[in-house]
Image: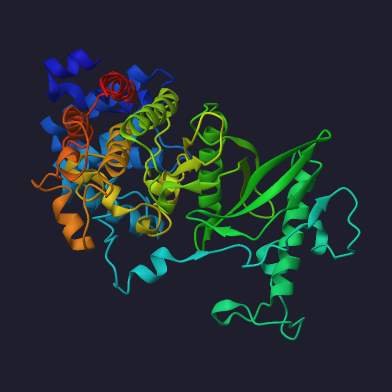
Amino acid sequence: MLADIIADPERGQQALPRLVGRLDSDDRTVRIGAACGLCLIASEDPGSVEYTVRRLVDRLDDDVARPESILALEYLMTQFPERVDETLQELREQRDEEPLQYTRQGGFVRSGYFQPGEPSRDDVGRVRKPGGADSGSGLVYGQADERGDERAPGGENSDENSQSEPGSDTDEEAPGGSSETARQRVKRLHERVESIVEQSRFDQLMVLTGEVPGRYAHAYPVLATHGGREQALSLRLFYQPTENRQTFQRRLAGAIEQWGRIDHEHVVSLYDSGTRPEPWVASQHVEATLRAGLPDWNVSEIVGTVARLADGLATLHQRDIVHGGIDPESVAVELETEAGQRARLDNIGLLTVYRWFVDPSTCLDPRFAAPEYFDASFGGVDQATDIYQLGAILYYLLAGEPPYDGSYADVRTRVPGETRPTPPSEAAAVPAFLDGIVSKALARQKLTRYETAVAFQQDLLDARERI
């Protein structure tokens, strides 16, 4: 079918319904061919754009969008922006809602993100954060609880049911002017964790220390007991948007399910997850991230560490998972191991969900963002984006600073522009042969970046042999 379209694109419109149907094929090659066919037909017959956009939007509304559908829509947006926008506007009026949260896959530019101080950012970036500042150190949930604290009504704890009533316990004011007291926060956490234990695989969970506010969730270090064995974990209660919460929860559940299938020593592991009383996961304990500061690694250790992260990234890509948000806060560092410090990729696939519901600048450091995040003409966010961002991590570790720095306006101009970052060998005591590896990973155009994470990893391993 694709060969016939290439030979005679004008007749291709007859094949449009069949091509659209092929986007649902289980065969990735068939889906890619179908996306290419739709783009070829549109290039020859722009009148087909409206039909194709409508069918693609239907597929992007699914819980998990096929990347080939996103690819085709991005191409149409780039080549026929007015036609696409007119069709999307018609869909808005017909549905009385935004037809897709995606707009351009580049998202940041089109939606006005990364614009500090704009009033319009207030609603876009607002999220509800579960829990307060006190976790109630040492509280044990599950089995028999001797404290006698009341459960939430009905055995479950929704946000509406768990809010404290005026005039309840007041031992001290919460930070930031909140009327919720420390005791009320501890009680609310108790109710939540108790509910989680009931639906989890664990016999009990003991909160060890206070909460750790993170990028996507509040994390609580816990000691989990299962089958008589104890294990230190992180219990993460995810932030949720104030609107479109059901859609958000479905997409988050899909991302968590994919993450949970990954078993790699350089990817943070998930052990359990659930949706009540709010989305949560029990993950491998994270001691620190690269955001806390640069580790005391020599060049060989840096290159070896990034090579291992690239191996973890290759495993994600083999399962068609795009991380989308690799920066220092999404690289977990284990400080004390027999083999020395170990790094793992964290927050797998979460940015690909959150970016449509909150301000993406709260989920990704723009200094590590690829050009496609600022300018849709560079394409969409995909596996090549992950390679760029891991290259930015390599630069950061070698040079001691991000590849780009300065104000948002400076970063936004320089990343997709002609200015290239200073080679690591000129910024620090780094062998010059590493400059080429960094430059290829940070290439502005995807076609000139490493084709795969495996190729990136192999160059790093070869380089380590030379150090």
Quarter of the image that includes the N terminus? top left
| Residue 47 spot, x, y in % from top left | 16, 38
Above or below residue 320? Residue 406 is below
Image-quadrant location for residue 117:
bottom left
User: Which residue occupies the foreground of this view, 304 or 200?
Assistant: 304
Is any atom of residue 125 visible in this view?
yes
2 left or right, relative to 274: left
- In the picture as drawn, the residue positioned furthest to the left comes out as 418
22 left or right, relative to 260: left
| Residue 266 spot, x, y in % from top left | 48, 31
| Residue 359 spot, x, y in % from top left | 38, 60
Is any atom of residue 274 visible in this view?
no
Quarter of the image that includes the C terminus? top left
Image-quadrant location for residue 442:
top left
| Residue 311 spot, x, y in % from top left | 41, 25
User: Which residue occupies the foreground of this view, 258 or 154?
Assistant: 258
User: Which residue occupies the foreground of this view, 456 or 13?
Assistant: 456
User: Which residue occupies the foreground of this view, 144 or 191?
Assistant: 144
